[in-house]
Image (cartoon, rainbow, N blue to C red):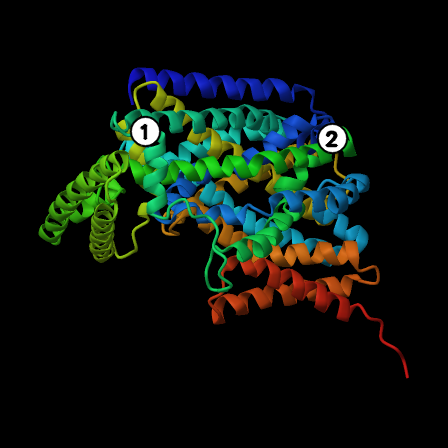
Amino acid sequence: MTALDWFVFVLYFGGVIAFAIYQSRKNVGIEGYFLANRRLPWGAIGLSVMATQASAITFIGTTGQAYDNGMEFIQVYLPLPLAMIVLCVLFVPIFYRAKVYTAYEYLENRFDAKTRSFTSFLFLLSRGMAAGIVMYAPAVVLSIMMGWDEIVTIAIMGVVTILYTMVGGITAVIWTDVVQMLMMFAGIGVALLVLFAELPAEVGMGDVIYIGGIQQMWKSIDLSWDLTNRYTLWSGLIGGFFLALAYFGCDQSQVQRYLTAKSLKQSRLSLIFIAFLKVPMQFLILSIGVLLFVFYHFERPPLIFNPVETALVENSHLQDEFALLNSQHQQTHELRRVATLGLLQARRSGEELGPWQDQIQEHDQQLALLRRESKELVKEVRGAASNDVNYVFPSYLIKYVPAGVLGLMIAVIFAAAMSSLDSELTALSSATIVDFYRRYWKRDASERHYLAASRWTTLLWGIFAAGVALYAGQLGSLIEAVNRIGSYFYGSLLGVFLLAFLVKRANGTGAFWGLWGGMLSVFLVSIYTDISFLYYNVVGAVVVVVIGTVFSIPRTEN
C-alpha cells in the first residue's frame, strides 16, 4: 500500500470509530448498552442488519465462490423477501411486545427456563464459531498485502473492534454499521468500475456479459430436484427460506437490532427495507466474481491465488513439477486469450462463432485441470487442502487497483468485517449476561455491575472468536463455511420458535425434547446422507415441531 492508501485507510477508521462513540453517549444502563434504550430509527436498523449479514465474507468468499461457480449462490437469497414478510407478521410483533432483551428470554415466558437456556446455549456456540470466521476474513487480505502473519492480523482486528464495542455498546455498533454499509455500497460500485476500466480498450460491457454467458457463468437457476446439489432453485427457495427465517428471526445478532426500534412499525419498516435491498446487493457482489472470471481471460491469473501456498510449493521438493505446471498454465492462458479476442472479432463481423467457442472451451478445461493438479501439489506440501477461493478478489485488488482506491477497497473489506464482528460480540454478550449470568448467578445486582460484566463478556467472546479464526483458513469457501455452521443449528432453533408461536398446546417439556430431537436429526442427516446443507434447516425445524407437539400431548390416566 502507498502512503495515500494508508491515509485513506486510517482517516476512514478514525472517523468511523469517533462517530460511533459519539452516538453512544446517550446510552443509559444495560438497556442502553444492549438495546440503545429502544430509540433508533428504522433506516439505521435496516442498514445495520444488512451490514451484520454482509460481512467481509461477502466480499471475499462470495466473489471467490462466483469466480469458481458463477451466479448459482444467488438462489439462496431468492426467498429472503418472503421470509421478511413472515417475520413482520409473526415474529417481530411477539418479540417487540414482550419487551425482552433476547429472543430466548421470550421462550422462558412461553415455555420454561431449560428451553430458554438450551436455545441460548446453541446460539452462543454457533455464533461464537461464526464470529471467528468473520474475524479471519480480513486476515486473508492483509496476509497478501503486507506479508503479515495471520495471527498478528487477527489480533489487531480483534483489539480494535472489541474496544469500541466494549465502550459504545449496541448504539456504537449500529451507527458504525450504517457508515460501513454505505461504504460497502460505494465499494461495490468502485470495484465494478475498476474492473471495466482494466479491460482491453476493444472489450466493452456487452462483450463481458457475452463471454460470461457462453461460459455459463451467468446461469443462476438450476431446476434440478437433486437433493445432493448444494445450490438449486428448490434448495434456495425451501432451505434458503428456512435459513433466512431462522437467521433473521431467531439469531440474537438480528433480533437485537429490531428490538432497538422506536416502535413496532419502525421494526417492521427496517425488515421491509432489507427485503428490497438485499437481493440486488448480493447479485452485484456475485457479479464481481463473474466479471473477475471474464477479466482473467485477458489478463493471466495466478496458477494459485494464495501467495503463501505458491511460495511453499516453489520452495519444496515439488518445485520442478510446479514450475512445469506454471509454464503450461502461461501457454494455455495465452491461447485462450487469443481465442477469446478472436471470438469477439468474429462476433462483430458476423462470422461463424463455433470454432472459437470450441477452442475456448478446450483451453478452459486444460486450465481447470492445471489448477487442480497444482492444488494437489499444495495439499501434498502443506498437508491440507488449498483454500485458494478466498484469495481471488484480494489478489486482484493488490495487483490492479490504483493507489488511493486500493486504500478505499481495503477499508471497505475491513468495514464489512468489523460490522459483522461487532454485532456478533454484542449479541453474544447480551445472551450470556441476560440468559445466564443475570438469570442464574447475579439476579439482583446493580445496573452498574451488569454493565461492567457485559463489557468483560464482550472481551472474552472476542478472545474466543480470535481462537476460532486461527482455524478458519482450513474451512474452504468462507461464505459457504459460515452458512454451513449456521445450518447445523438454525433449523432446530427455528423449530422451537415456530412451536411457541403456532402450537398453542405446546409446553416446555415438548419444546425441550423437540430441540434435542431436531439437533440429533440434523447430525444424523449430515453424517448418513449427502443432501445439501441448506435442507438441514428444514429437517431441524420440522422434527422439532413434530416431536415438540407429540411430547406436549397430556397423558390420560386410566
Residue receiving disc 2: 266
Circle nearer the N terminus (1, 2): 1
Looking at the image, residue 267 lies above or below residue 507: above
Query: Residue 8's x, y, as percent?
Result: 39, 17
Q: Quadrant of the N terminus?
A: top left
Q: What element carries label 1?
A: loop
Between residues 296 and 505, which one lies in front from this camera angle? 296
Query: Residue 293's x, y, as percent?
Result: 32, 41
Looking at the image, residue 86 lies above or below residue 275: below
Which residue is found at the position 58% from the left and 22% from the top? 20
Looking at the image, residue 551 lies above or below residue 288: below
Q: Is residue 439 left or right of residue 199?
A: right
Looking at the image, residue 345 lies above or below residue 517: above
Which residue is found at the position 56% from the left and 30% from the top? 165
Which one is closest to the eye, mark 1 or mark 2?
Answer: 1
Inspect the image, locate mark 1, and give the three-letter code of the amino acid beneath it: Gly
Q: Is residue 507 left or right of residue 119?
A: right
Crowdedness of circle 2 by 10 Å Cα count: few (<14), some, many (20+)?
many
Cα–Cα span, label 1 and label 2? 44 Å
Q: What element carries label 2?
A: helix
Which residue is found at the position 58% from the left and 21% from the top? 21
Query: Residue 162's x, y, as percent?
Result: 52, 32
Between residues 334 and 390, which one lies in front from this camera angle? 334
Pick out the residue farthest to the bottom. 558
Inspect the image, locate mark 2, and give the three-letter code of the amino acid beneath it: Gln
Q: Would residue 346 be seen by someone viewing this image from the given angle?
A: yes
Res. 10 image quadrant: top left
Crowdedness of circle 1 by 10 Å Cα count: few (<14), some, many (20+)?
few
Q: How many labels does the image show?
A: 2
Residue receiving disc 1: 204
